[in-house]
Structure formats: C-alpha cells, structure tokens
Amino acid sequence: MEHRLISAIETALGWNGPSKLGRGFVRGRVDDPALFTRILTPNRLLDIAMRRSLNRPQFRCFRNGEEVHPAIYYNDSVSPRGQSIPMVNMHRLGDLLRDGATLIMDQVNVFDPTMEVACRALQWWAHERVQVNAYLTTNDAAGFPLHWDDHDVLIVQLAGEKEWEVRGTSRNVPMYRDADPNNSPSDDILWAGTMTPGDVMHIPRGHWHQATRTGSGTGKSLHVTFGITKRTGASWLTWLADWSREHEIFRHDLDRRDSTDVQALTDAAARLIGERPPAGYLAAYERETTPSRHVPYVDTLGALDAAVCTTHFPPQIEENSATVDIVTSGKKLTFAAETLPALRLLLSGQPVHLNQATAIAGAEATKVAEILVEEEICAPLTPELSSGYTGLVTNATF
C-alpha cells in the first residue's frame, strides 16, 4: 500500500523504508500544506470529541501543566429512558481553549477513518503496530514536562507552532516494564526549536523530550504523534515461554535438590531457542495478529460493490501448483490457483471496486471478495472508510 503521508515522511527524513526507525533522532520538512490539512485539522479534532462518548484517559485536558478534572468539561447526557452517557461539554471545553489549554486524544485512529488508514499504512510499512495521538494546544499553555516514551514516535506538525526540546537517552532502549525506573533526564540536548506546519520529527524510544507554547502568546498548535511499538528480545523470550508449554519438561515442578533435572531443563531451553529463533517470532506475530474492527458484510443490507484489505499487516500469498494459500490474522485460507489475480488486487491494501475487478480479473473476483470480507480479511468499502483513502491512497491498479 502506497500512502502519500509515508512518502512525504520518507522524503523529509531522507529515509528509504523503515530501517532507520529507532536508530537516531532526525528532523525534516514537507512542503505540501494540502497534505497536512487533509490529515487532520483542529476543528475536525473537536468534531470527533463532540460526536462521541469519550472517557479519560482517551481524552484529556491540561492547563498550566496539570490535568483538568474531567468534571469541569464533561456532562452526563441523560436519555429519555434515564440512561447516562458521558459527553464532552463543548461550551466548557471552548472556555478552556480560549484561556489556553492542551487537549490530548489518544488513538484517534479508532474514531477517524483518515487516521485509521494512515496507521494501517504505517503498519504495513514498518511491520509493527502503530497508533496515533493528537495534541491541540491553544494560546500560552504548557505541555507535558520532560519525559521519554517506551516506543519510537513520528511527530507531524499539522497547524500552528510549538516549542520543543529533545535530549538524548539516560538509559539505552528503556522499556515500560524494565529493571530500572529511568527517572533522571539526560543533559545532552540534541535539538531545541520551533515546529511549524510541515515539520516532521522522529524521536527514538528513550529520548527525553518536551513541548510547550508557554510564552508564545496567542495562537494554536496541532500535532499528531504516531507511536510505533517495535518487538524486542524480551518480546521474543515471552513468546518462547508460551511455546515451552508444549514440552512436558517445562511443565514439571522445579526441583531445588536435583541438579540432573536442572541440566535437562537447560538443554531443553537451548533446543527451544534453536527451534524458534527471533525471525520465526516476528513472522508469527504478523501472521497471528487478530482481525481489526470493521463494519461486517451483511448481504441483506445490499450487494458488496467495493472492498479493501484491512489486516494489520500485509497478508502472505503462498502460491502452490493448483492452489493459493492466504495466511493472515491467525487464519489460512486456500483458493484455486486461477483466483490469484483477484487475490493480488483485493489484498493490495488499496480500495477495489468489484465491477472493475471483475472486468479484469474475472467473474470469480466478486466471490473471492465476499469470502475475504466474511473472513474479516477485507472490509466493505463504506463511504466513511473510503474517505480515509481519498487523496491519500490510490485505488488498486489492474
């Protein structure tokens, strides 16, 4: 899947693929204002908050560097049947923004199709899980204090300006669950300056950073942070621990007095490591990640006329002599070999209109699409989902 935002980020940072993720701090700039207004605007972010029932910590507000109590900008909307639903009070939220505040919406990709598609494209690109958070700051407002993240981030400034400071690490590749709390910031300042619309920044895991509009006067800032959580050696060992249960020797109680049993256990662990190396773990992680959340295909609601692949990672297409196997989302589906052209279209990650697919790939394209949708490998291309691709990802080419 080729996404306009990924191409722009690669060009801005001087990258060619995801190999430099996590390898070092780097900044760049994209001179394409239309791209950033297409991704997200302050008003669109507020529209998302207005139309959905959001709760802390998914939606938070900060003022003077401290979190505002949700009771100040939330109301319980009571239905005629007495059902209470928490909703953001947009009038109070507006007052906070006029005085100067920072709004944070985590996982915007859950609510907004443009962000959903951008995160999926980044996942296909990086082969790692991605989520996006949005930060809207108004007037003279502080942000988070100096901190580090337990994942790599790509930061895109979409509107307005914000002051940043980025420092080096004080502990190499720290983790959320770690042997060291890593509470002492580094004194090594890598960059301090202002992010303006079009600026892009990559901050690797563990680098200390902070952003603020304190002292900036009137104005606003909107940036999004794509958090990319990469697999680690510890992740691989956790996976190995799950596989160890297949072997009886690992299910026995540990005996403190029998050194023979300990040696046998050590030897079995060494064999397990050889049988299931890190490459096997990474491949399995991509194959077995469960399907994403999408509108189901219900034929009574109308015929399927367009679809798009919505797996977290690119499906594996394995060609055999008379069949084709599709491996993804914890499933393996087998199709006849003649369906390969239709499968390549439908699993490209790009929107596919079935009347065009049928004209090129044959009549079986529609049936293949229905199967893939039923198995939750593809999803119906609803107008809302389609809007996430428009102008950013081209339709599948034939």
Image: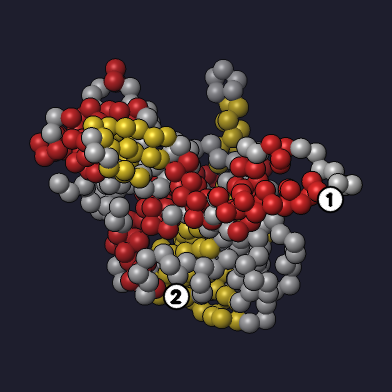
Dot 2 amino acid type: Arg
- Dot 2: few (<14), some (14–19), or many (≥20) neighbours within 10 Å? some
**Residue 36: which numbered mark, if any?**
none
Q: Is residue 280 above or below residue 306?
A: below
Left/right placement of residue 19 relative to residue 169 reads: left
Tell me the residue at 42%/58% (across/down): 126
| Residues at marks 1 and 2, CA–CA distance in whole angstroms | 55 Å
Dot 1 amino acid type: Ser
Identify the secondary structure beneath mark 1: helix
Tell me the residue at 76%/37% (across/down): 252
Left/right placement of residue 336 relative to residue 232 reads: left
Residue 369 visible, this orientation = no
Left/right placement of residue 337 relative to residue 310 reads: left
- Dot 1: few (<14), some (14–19), or many (≥20) neighbours within 10 Å? few
Q: Is residue 260 above or below residue 374?
A: below
> Could you tell me residue 261's position as x and y percent?
79, 46
The disc, 1 or 2, on the residue closer to the chain's N-terminal end is 2
Residue 34 visible, this orientation = yes
Q: Looking at the image, which is closer to me, 43 or 263?
A: 263
**Residue 259: which numbered mark, if any?**
1
Residue labelled with disc 2: 27
